[in-house]
Image (cartoon, helix red, strand yellow):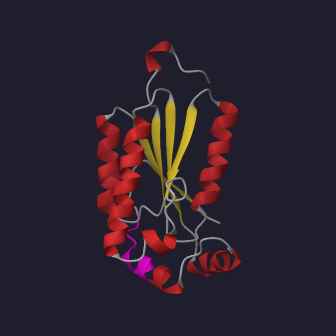
């Protein structure tokens, strides 16, 4: 679908949410490919990987996590200012306050916004984690992030529309 003349602006911010190793990057890649193949929009992925932030460094402690979130937010802010662009944010996005900030940023920019919650059982996530060979999470990081994870709730305006996908 080609955008009409009055739509030459950023179109959407799609935020992927989930605990470590729940398929966020896989789903993001699938959506990215689909949008590239079936739309005229520029599709941009923002993630720790695209910013050169490793899990070891970006999630080493709470201060590092804050810096990582600030870097992700700044990158999203840069990308949503580009015309005809769909921005996919592929990260944990596990803190509801951070999702609220992203929601406000999207609304201020006049963008559509949604969450894609990759919700799989801890057992499946552990299996997927064991199968991962690059830039893996430490067991301590996984445990800490699971404990701090704030599950999206579609009663919160910043968590909707909410699309939940499983394994």
Q: Residue at x 44, y 15 (%)?
A: 6
Left or right position of 91 against 1: left
Q: Is residue 162 above or below residue 39?
A: below
Percent x, y of residue 140: 47, 86
Residue found farthest to the bottom: 140
Percent x, y of residue 16: 50, 55
Residue 139 falls inside the magenta stretch: no
Q: Is residue 59 above or below residue 30?
A: below
Residue 148 falls inside the magenta stretch: yes
Q: Residue at x 60, y 58 (%)?
A: 25
Percent x, y of residue 49: 55, 58
Left or right position of 159 against 129: left
Q: Main structural element of the magenta stretch: helix, strand or loop?
A: helix
Q: Residue at x 34, y 32 (%)?
A: 110
Q: Quadrant of the C terminus?
A: bottom right
Can residue 87 be seen in this snapshot? yes
Q: How many marks?
A: 0
Q: Residue at x 45, y 78 (%)?
A: 146
Q: Is residue 161 above or below residue 164?
A: above
Quadrant in the picture for residue 93: bottom left
Left or right position of 120 against 115: right
Quadrant in the picture for residue 72: bottom left
Q: Nearer the viewer, residue 56 or 116?
A: 56
Please provide the residue range marked out in magenta. 144-151
Percent x, y of residue 141: 47, 80
Q: Quadrant of the N terminus?
A: top right
Can residue 157 be seen in this snapshot? no
């Amino acid at each position: 679908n080609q955008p009409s003349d009055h739509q030459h602006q950023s179109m959407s911010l799609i935020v992927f949410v989930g605990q470590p190793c729940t398929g966020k990057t896989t789903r993001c890649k699938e959506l990215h490919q689909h949008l590239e193949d079936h739309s005229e929009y520029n599709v941009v992925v923002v993630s720790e990987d695209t910013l050169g932030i490793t899990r070891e460094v970006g999630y080493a402690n709470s201060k590092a996590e804050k810096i990582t979130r600030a870097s992700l937010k700044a990158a999203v802010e840069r990308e949503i200012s580009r015309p005809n662009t769909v921005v996919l944010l592929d990260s944990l996005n596990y803190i509801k306050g951070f999702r609220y900030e992203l929601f406000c940023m999207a609304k201020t920019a006049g963008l559509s916004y949604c969450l894609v919650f990759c919700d799989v059982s801890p057992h499946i996530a552990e299996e997927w984690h064991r199968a991962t060979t690059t830039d893996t999470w430490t067991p301590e990081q996984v445990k800490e992030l699971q404990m701090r994870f704030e599950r999206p709730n579609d009663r919160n305006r910043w968590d909707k529309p909410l699309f939940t996908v499983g394994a």
